[in-house]
Amino acid sequence: MKKNMEQRIKIVWLLSILAILLITAGQGYWLWNQYEYANHEKAEEAYSLAMKAIAGNDSLRSLQAKSKADTQKVNVYKIKMLLDTRNGKYENNLLMGVTTAQKGKKDNSKKAGRNAEKSTRNDETNQLKGRLTDLTHQKNIAYKDSFNIYSNTASAMNPASLISLYRINEAIPFSLPQLDSLLADRLPNVNVRTQLEVANDTTFSWDPIKTTSGPAWNTLLTIRYPYNPLKHQWVSIQLHVVPHEVLLRMGWQLLGSICLVVLLALCLLFQIKTILKQRRIDELRKSFVNTMIHELKRPVQALKMCVAFMNDKSLRTNEKAMDEVVRDSIFELDELSAYLSKLRDMTRAEDQHTQLSIATFDIKKLVEKLIRLHQHPAGKKVTIATHLSENSLVTADPVHISNIISNLIENSVKYSDQEVHIDLGITLSDHVLTIKVSDNGIGIPLSEQGKVFEKFYRAGNLPDRSIPGIGLGLSYVKLLAEAHRGKVSLASQPGKGTQIEINIPQ
């Protein structure tokens, strides 16, 4: 039966550990998914803030371009759309140019010469391409750019937005310091790197491109924004999604998961502890029953012998023998009554507080009476030395105090050799009653000193297991002391003796 119970407890332990691991793994998996989701949200938020900074930068540049309109102006000289039937695509031809304002006649003649030269060069290019017309009649042209854009449908391209970006960039070239300032304002706690790029391919792209790379705990967000799509000019923005900000955003989820795992683990551990405690209580109950039967059997057997003696009429005539039988009967009845009293008080303590009848009495007289009436077992020489305080009036329950001292003296006699020396000291100072009982007994091992105050526990270093006792002595003393709001302490050395000290406030 015992082996079966141990196997069950081991199985419960293993299942509990497995449950804790599975719960922890499940919560970890859920938290990781939540972290990835929160990390994605943080990246989207950073992207949105970065695009707002870019839009703000374009707005500032647009305002700056308007203030410069009196010196130069970007004009659209030609927009033509052709259908390439061979490729099934639309070809959009754009001719852009920058014109300068005419401040005077002299200036106009010089600029006309320069513009004529630039116009001639652009015309040669146009003639090679075979797509644009001669624009030499524009006399104040600073320079011209031509672009061919292919699209699948006629409405795929938005020339207005492309031309607007071209105009802004030609009037106010893109400035990284200004964009960096706006990004720092929008993303104050993020390390941002920016650089200007020119695409090597000839594909026109006028939508920003967002890419993420790296692990979830160190995500790199890259934004490529075409600030001048017609010339394939981009600004690249790189920023890291900071992990601790993602974790702060998940604060309540992390705290809730940790609390849930800890709570479940504590519940499982408490369940295991309860099972072990129940097992120990069951073992103590069995041990108590066996010990109780053994302990009660001795006084009952002695009383049976005494009754048998008194039942013999021929033996009752011996007065001396009769007195001894009566004395032994009283002693055994007192022992039996003491056992039953301890059991009664310990049982009451499990259901309610120990009832006290507080009174003021002379503890010196109480001690003297206890020593005088104490019955020493045959074969032992007992010496009790008392050290009593002059002030002997105390306030407590006299019956319980008497039981405390009696139990301590009884333990000292029971767990000592043939010659027993007991020191009983009682002092009253600073409103504290101190009771000290020291002996020269077998002592208690250090490993068991914390257990001797438990119910039904008996030390393992007993020289003779036949020594009467059910393991209630010290637990009973502790119960009565705590009922008086007092404390019990123990100091012992195996082979040298034990000292019990009780402090009860007055």
Image (cartoon, rainbow, N blue to C red):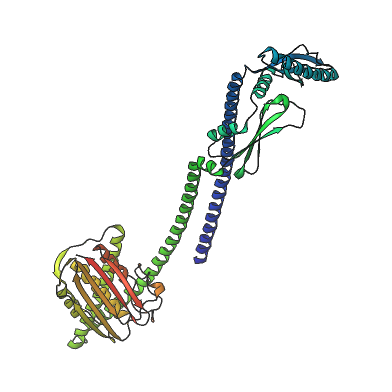
In the image, what residue occupies the spot 56% across and 47% down? 28
List the single residue furthest toward the front. 106
Q: Is residue 262 visible?
A: yes
Taking depth in this image into account, of 108 and 193 the one nearest to the observer is 108
Left or right of 31? Residue 487 is left
Residue 21 image offset from top left, x and y in percent = 55, 52
Left or right of 70? Residue 298 is left
Which of the 4 image quarters holds residue 66?
Answer: top right
Taking depth in this image into account, of 76 and 17 the one nearest to the observer is 76
Residue 244 image offset from top left, x and y in percent = 53, 44
Quadrant of the snapshot with the C terminus = bottom left
Left or right of 234? Residue 301 is left
Taking depth in this image into account, of 140 and 173 the one nearest to the observer is 140
Residue 295 image offset from top left, x and y in percent = 33, 74
With respect to residue 463, does 483 lie above or below? above
Q: Is residue 47 visible?
A: no
With respect to residue 322, does 80 lie above or below? above
Residue 269 image offset from top left, x and y in percent = 47, 56
